[in-house]
Image (cartoon, rainbow, N blue to C red):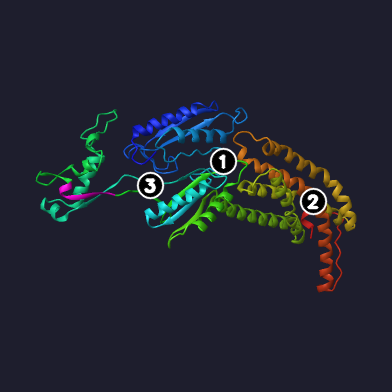
């Protein structure tokens, strides 16, 4: 709600919003939290994740029916409620609805989020409003809002040192009396009754005596000797707007501009870059001020970096295990070189499914890497078994590949059948993991087919390379050493 809105007005607005939700049969439950608890109860600033709870704020947790049972999708309900609320309920400063639960990127920030940093709050508020205006005019942006505004009612008390000294008061004592008169203070507790929750008493001026600056100027300040004088005789009271929230990113003062995207429109990262580029070209940022991306943009970059490191580590350990198993480096190396073939299927499947390459996709690639290397291991192992028996290379390839075709196809087909419901018919709660099924199916389908051709060809090329290297550098002829009866531990 607008800064300065009372708890009663906030509760009234929250009730009206609950009535709007009740119009939609798809809404099953609405849980509402209004205002903020005091530090003497169970207050925590991390409950909502969006900002410090305030008297003029409310949070709703909405539970919808299953997506397969409702006629309208979540976006239609969100946009409908928000549009009607802003049009019919006065005093709303910021009203945003975010889908949560099945979203793997769910966080305290909106999917599309940018921050403007700088020192002066007034300058930050002006630049933030300009960026928010640009975001609202960007196609695909929805529910645009700033994290705070510079219109919180605030008054500055400038104490007259000479007059305060005459009464034996310090500026700190004057400020404390003014604060407790308006905001109140809790009484002391002299005893507690056993097994009974003790009520606390808040003492402050009545509401009619603390409505405006005139009441503030005329509140009485008590001196050490009991003398009471109006505050205006000791200090000058001036109006000075304050921010509704002081927000920091690291050690910098910032203002956040947040928004949301819709399925079927531009993705969050494209919108973030679009708004950022427009703001940098249209707004003249003073020295020391700038704009940075947050939200899905930075979360995706951080997640990509961590998962790519995990993918590299996984490939390295797979290679080391294969080196130990095959007692050499060249055969495992050709297996590792077959892994990029799966990426053609990955990107093709994502393109056909109209899905983005996300953190879930990278996680699926890591899983797919372990599956796809199995095809190479089965083929190379059988080819090496035939060659150990003295079968010529080309004949070994011709004999081994048909024998390994059935188990390779069975393994791949079973995996694709299991992942088909996730990729094509995800249930509620599994929507966010749909790219995982898409990547695994596409990667296995294309990767397996290409590996059946690539692995035998790669094996012959590696064999020719070994022969050429021996003739070129060692000046000798090399042939595969045939062994009548071999164990895995006796291979070269």
Q: Does residue 275 appear left or right of residue 200 in this picture?
A: right
Q: Which mark is residue 103?
A: 1
Q: Does residue 208 appear left or right of residue 35 in this picture?
A: left
Q: Nearer the viewer, mark 2 or mark 1?
A: 1
Q: On the image, numbered disc 3 is attached to which residue?
A: 245
| Upstream in sequence: badge 1 or badge 3 | 1
- Please report the bounds of the magenta region as a residue range: 232-239
Q: Position of residue 85 (x, y in %)?
A: 46, 33
Q: Nearer the viewer, residue 305 or 355?
A: 355
| Upstream in sequence: badge 2 or badge 3 | 3
Q: Nearer the viewer, mark 1 or mark 3?
A: 3
Q: Nearer the viewer, residue 16 or 48?
A: 16
Q: Residue at x 56, y 40 (%)?
A: 103
Q: On the image, numbered disc 2 is attached to which residue?
A: 450
Quadrant assignment, res 187:
top left
Q: Residue at x 23, y 42 (%)?
A: 180
């Amino acid at each position: 709600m607008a800064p300065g809105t009372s708890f009663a007005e906030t509760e009234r607005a929250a009730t009206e919003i609950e009535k709007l939700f009740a119009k939609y049969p798809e809404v099953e439950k609405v849980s509402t939290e209004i205002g903020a608890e005091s530090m003497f109860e169970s207050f925590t600033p991390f409950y909502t994740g969006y900002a410090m709870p305030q008297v003029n704020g409310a949070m709703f947790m909405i539970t919808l029916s299953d997506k397969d049972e409702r006629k309208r999708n979540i976006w239609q309900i969100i946009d409908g409620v928000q549009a009607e609320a802003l049009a019919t309920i006065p005093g709303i400063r910021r009203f945003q609805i975010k889908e949560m639960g099945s979203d793997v990127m769910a966080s305290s920030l909106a999917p599309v989020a940018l921050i403007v940093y700088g020192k002066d709050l007034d300058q930050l508020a002006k630049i933030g409003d300009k960026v928010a205006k640009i975001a609202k005019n960007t196609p695909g942006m929805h529910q645009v809002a700033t994290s705070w505004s510079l219109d919180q009612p605030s008054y500055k008390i400038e104490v007259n040192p000479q007059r305060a000294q005459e009464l034996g008061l310090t500026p700190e004592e004057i400020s404390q009396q003014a604060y407790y008169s308006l905001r109140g203070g809790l009484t002391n507790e002299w005893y507690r009754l056993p097994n009974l929750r003790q009520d606390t008493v808040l003492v402050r001026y009545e509401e009619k005596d603390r409505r405006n600056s005139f009441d503030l100027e005329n509140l009485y300040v008590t001196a050490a000797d009991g003398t009471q004088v109006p505050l205006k005789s000791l200090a000058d009271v001036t109006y000075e707007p304050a921010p509704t929230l002081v927000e920091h990113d690291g050690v910098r003062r910032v203002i956040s501009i947040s928004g949301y995207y819709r399925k079927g429109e531009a993705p969050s990262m494209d919108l973030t870059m679009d708004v950022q580029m427009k703001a940098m070209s249209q707004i003249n940022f003073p020295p020391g001020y700038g704009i940075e991306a947050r939200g899905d943009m930075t979360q995706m970059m951080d997640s990509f970096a961590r998962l790519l490191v995990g993918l590299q580590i996984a490939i390295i350990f797979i290679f080391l295990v294969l080196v130990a198993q095959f007692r050499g480096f060249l055969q495992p190396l050709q297996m590792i070189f077959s892994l990029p073939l799966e990426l053609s299927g990955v990107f093709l499947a994502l393109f056909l499914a109209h899905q983005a390459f996300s953190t879930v996709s990278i996680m699926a690639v890591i899983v797919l890497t372990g599956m796809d290397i199995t095809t190479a291991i089965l083929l190379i192992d059988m080819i090496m078994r035939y060659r150990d028996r003295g079968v010529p290379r080309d004949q070994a390839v011709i004999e081994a590949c048909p024998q390994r075709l059935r188990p390779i196809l069975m393994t791949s087909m079973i995996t694709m059948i299991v992942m088909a419901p996730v990729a094509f018919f995800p249930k509620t709660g599994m929507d966010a993991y749909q790219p995982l099924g898409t990547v695994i199916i596409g990667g296995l389908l294309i990767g397996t087919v290409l590996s059946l051709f690539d692995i035998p060809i790669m094996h012959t090329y590696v064999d020719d390379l070994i022969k050429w290297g021996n003739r070129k550098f060692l000046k000798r002829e090399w042939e595969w050493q045939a062994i009548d009866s071999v164990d895995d531990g006796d291979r070269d």
